[in-house]
Image (spheres, helix red, strand yellow):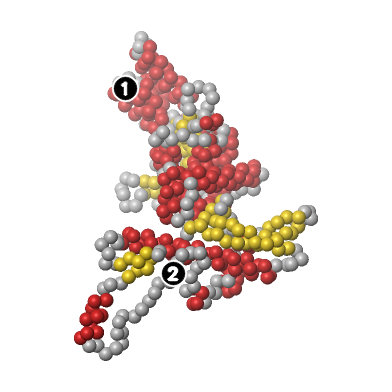
Amino acid sequence: MHVLSVNHNELDFKTIEEKIYKIVCEVACGIMKDILEKIDLMLLAKRDTKEYRNKGLRKTCIHTVMGEVEYERRIYQTEDNDGKSIHVYLLDQYLKKETIGHVSSNLAEKMVENVLEQSYRKSAKNIESMCHSSLSHTSIWNVVQELGERLEERETRLIDQYNKGNVNGEREVDVLFQEADGVWINMQGKDRPKSGKSKKKEMKMAKSYEGWEKRGNQKNAYLTYNRTIIASFDNARDFKKLSDATIAENYNVDEIKYRIINGDGDPWIKRGIGEEGVHYQLDPFHRARAVVRAVPEKAQVKKLNNMFDKGKIDEGMEYLKELMIEYVEDEKVRERLHKLYNYLANNYDGLMPYKLRDMSLPKPPEGIVYRNMGTMESSVCDVIKLRMKGRKMSWTKSGANSLGKLLALRASGNLYETLDSLFDATITDDKLEEVVEEVVQLSAAEVNKKPKDSGIYPIKKAPMPFEGQPMTLGRKAIRDLTKNRVELVLR
């Protein structure tokens, strides 16, 4: 126990705040332990003794946002539907306690919040300082992995239901924009490619949205409206299924009249071309970048890109042929131009900007506009690259997959809603009322009790000297000497 005076030169507000926060967390852990054990005692009295046989207490520990809570719960022997003997914890069943190992769902959310912004090691330090839970970076990695596996299981079920025709969202739109691109991630260990010089694998990323809306009051700043993002290392076929199933989960696909798909020309992005109402557009950024890399002079680059931007596709292709003839004796330039020509020819149907095509797009909803596509490069950077590339980082396939899916959920605005569905730790109102009435009715005497093994001592209180007494000059002098010397008893 430490006795610190507020007049002490070495005492500052930060120290007081940290001490008080630590005390409050320890007291909260003691209250949580008491509540859990009392609920367990209540279930012992209310159980069907013929069905559940008490086999004694078992110690356990759970990491929470308040710290480590150690408590005892009873294990019961019962039988399953097949008559086989099994052991269960009625406390866990009653509260629907969903955890990741010995980590509570609330603490798991805090871990995810930190991991999406910084490394696992820094996240472990932050969690320890904020939540008084001493967890290694490996423990946090395991939590993220478990959540990633649950997300994959959820996606598998969604695709299965979609294939059976059981998935159809309620939202109805006439036009849906879709963009896709890949980001190459450094791999490590057994997941590193065995052939070739590259140490990377491509993580696929797709984005769907309904149009653009203004960003605040900024005149020329727009954001994609109601966007949904997915990310995965799946092969092209499986990723297409995941993309279609995710869209069907959110939208009534029968009411979508136009789907505009924007991509860089990779075959896995173009898998949906040919379906009714689907229109493919070659991403303007990738097309312009390919022209810059191949055409030697800036004036020629500007002229060629202007032709494609204005929809003069055939004229642009002819001009490119002229350039190939002009540089026929320069082998390096000729090879680059030939490669550019093949790239554009393979994506000829997507060269015309969608806004210049003979399509009668319905009028957009109020507050929404239809603009030129090409937002994917920026989205890939914001969602995946800033966290998962650079700083000599490398990943296992499962580790990158799990984190990528969580990053995509955050970008879609569905992170916490999805995590809640993965935990499914909802307590009904009836049960909550029962807990309050029968368990948490702590008397004033119980509140002031010293928590067991907590090391917390109640603060001693005393009135000011001569409080409520007739005041003399001597008594006044004594009160003046003591009124500013307040002592805090801190552990």
The first of marks 1 and 2 along the sequence is 1
Q: Residue at x 66, y 44 (%)?
A: 164
Q: Residue furthest left?
A: 473
* Residue 418, above or below 43: above
Q: Residues within 10 Å of mark 1 (few under 14, many from 20)?
A: some
Residue 339: percent from left, percent from top: 43, 19
Residue located beneath label 1 in the image: 300
Residue 279: percent from left, percent from top: 50, 35
Residue 155: assigned label: none
**Along the viewing direction, whichever of 181 and 156 lies nearer the viewer:** 156
The image quadrant where one finds the C terminus is bottom left
Residue located beneath label 2 in the image: 457
Tell me which amino acid carries mark 1. Gln
Q: Are marks 1 and 2 in contact (CB under 8 Å)?
A: no
Note whether residue 247 is visible. Answer: no
* Residue 456, above or below 345: below
Tell me which amino acid carries mark 2. Tyr
* Residue 179, above or below 428: above
Q: Residue at x 37, y 31 (%)?
A: 309
Rounded to the nearest angstrom, the CA distance separating label 1 from label 2 is 81 Å
